[in-house]
Amino acid sequence: MLTAQPTASHFVDGRYHEDATGAAIAVTYPHTGAVIARLHTATPAVIELALASAARAQVEWAALRPVERGRILRRAADLIRDRGAELARLETLDTGKPIQETEVADWPSGADALEYFAGLAPTVTGETIPLGGDFAYTLREPLGVCVGIGAWNYPSQIACWKAAPALAMGNAMVFKPSEVTPLGALKLAEILHQAGLPAGLFNVVQGGGAVGGQLTRDPRVAKVSLTGSVPTGARVYAAAAEGMKHVTMELGGKSPLIVFDDANLEDAVGAAMLGNFYSSGQVCSNGTRVFVQRGIKARFLARLAERTALIRAGDPLDRETQFGPLVSPAQHAKVMDYIRIAQAEGARLVCGGAAGREGANFVQPTVFAEVTDTMTLAREEVFGPVMAVLDFDTEDEVIARANATQFGLAAGVFTADLARGHRVIGRLQAGTCWINAYNLTPVEMPFGGVKASGLGRENSRAAIEHYSQLKAVYVGMGPVAAPY
């Protein structure tokens, strides 16, 4: 039965909460278009309750020993793993991703984040600074109430990636998922509460940009963490700046994946497919500009077409399905427009290029060759299964072309010459990079971009700096020397 109706639209102050006066939100299963849940946008009353309860609960939470906070997060990670099959099905219904993806990538990554920050929390300490007879010390303190704003492509993973460091450091969080995929965050709130998280510390409210704007501008909010597009990031960043709030912005990309002619062909082709077709191409860090050195280009394109033809598209709930629909009709229309533009501008269609036959929101895995740097397909983020293959000759040339973009989220290099791999990565303007791999994002490794692709970092010890603030204390051990 295709239903995923939660107990209520919001989770506030430790319980599900409903206010049916808010505008209706219909949640659809992308494969069929069937409505699987009906929610309501958060009203001002719901937002007030969420923020007030978060501000109240955060004070006592911050006073706990970090190890106590960590125990709760660890229990939540265990509960997610125990309920893996149920949560994967919910994620598939919400996003349209194949269940073979959601079982291994989405909620499991969220559980890893909760477990990692649970262990990290007790290790975050200050330092002492000897100053002769006097000394100073530092304390790392929580920020207070944080707002998390999620994207629709990895809704549950994103919720966990934001909640885990925020809660580990003693903050509270009010989380607003995308109105397109709003269900997973409610389950996360339920699981955290079941694990022992005190009421009010992780609240979920539904809605679109207007709700996000109200949360961002509220004076009780100390920090905003957004995953979304560059235009949305610019608006949220400006709103947060009005109140001098901390921000983390994980935004879009048009990332280069550079394949030198000495690269392992199968590995490079496989990485290009993962970096363009996994989750039907709806991944912000995707390597959608695939630069292939001319010596390997013909073999690369031939093998890419062969392997792409074997991708199994179909019902996302079928375990044999490798490739699902796009998240919505609007996203489908956007991607098909980009395909038409690429053909009109002279790119050569290697394979795909049409709407899939498996359902209304399917687009075939698509590859274009002879793409030039000035084409729309090489400049704008498509967020769909459309790969642009560009030719190059020299190392210096490809580095300059790869960097000629407003984006700087990710980059990858494939080469048998590891010295060249490190050298090229060192010159690429990107925050998250891979050598002879692509799109692997373990929680132990920082994730984030430069330039228009964002500010701050998700995951790893680096995330702690973005969910805490440093206090310095000078201790005088002798008489005060004053010239007055």
Image: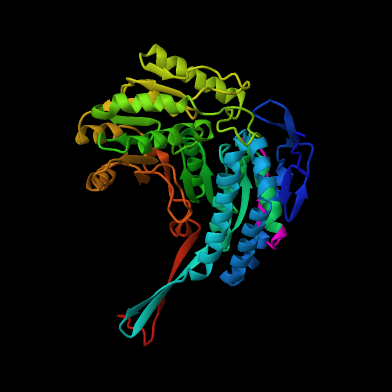
Residue 117 to residue 125: above or below: above
**Residue 200 appears in view:** no
The residue positioned farthest toward the bottom in the image shown: 478
Q: Would residue 170 be seen by someone viewing this image from the given angle?
A: yes
Can you give x and y, in whole percent of width and height, for residue 196 in the image? 70, 63
The N terminus: image quadrant: top right
Going by the image, does 3 lie left or right of 217? Answer: right
Answer left or right for 376 relative to 394: right
Which residue is drawn at the image coordinates 40% and 12% (left, top)? 344
- Looking at this rendering, what residue extends furthest in the top direction? 344
Render colour scheme = rainbow
Up the image or down, 119 lies above or below 214; here it is below
Which range of residues does the magenta coloring cover? Answer: 194-208
Residue depicted at 48% across the width and 39% down the height? 233
Quadrant the C terminus occupies: bottom left
Instruction: Tell me, yes or no, whether the highlighted magenta stretch contains residue 311.
Output: no
- Residue 370 higher or lower than 7, as above or below: above
Where residue 177 sits: x, y (%)?
Answer: 62, 42
Q: For this rendering, which residue is in front, 2 or 181?
A: 2
Rendering coords of residue 439 (x, y %): 44, 42
Residue 102 in the image: above or below residue 465: above
Residue drawn at x 48%, y 48% as measured from the top left: 248
- Percent across and percent down for residue 210 are 62, 36
Count the labels in the image: 0
Which secondary structure is most common in the magenta stretch?
loop
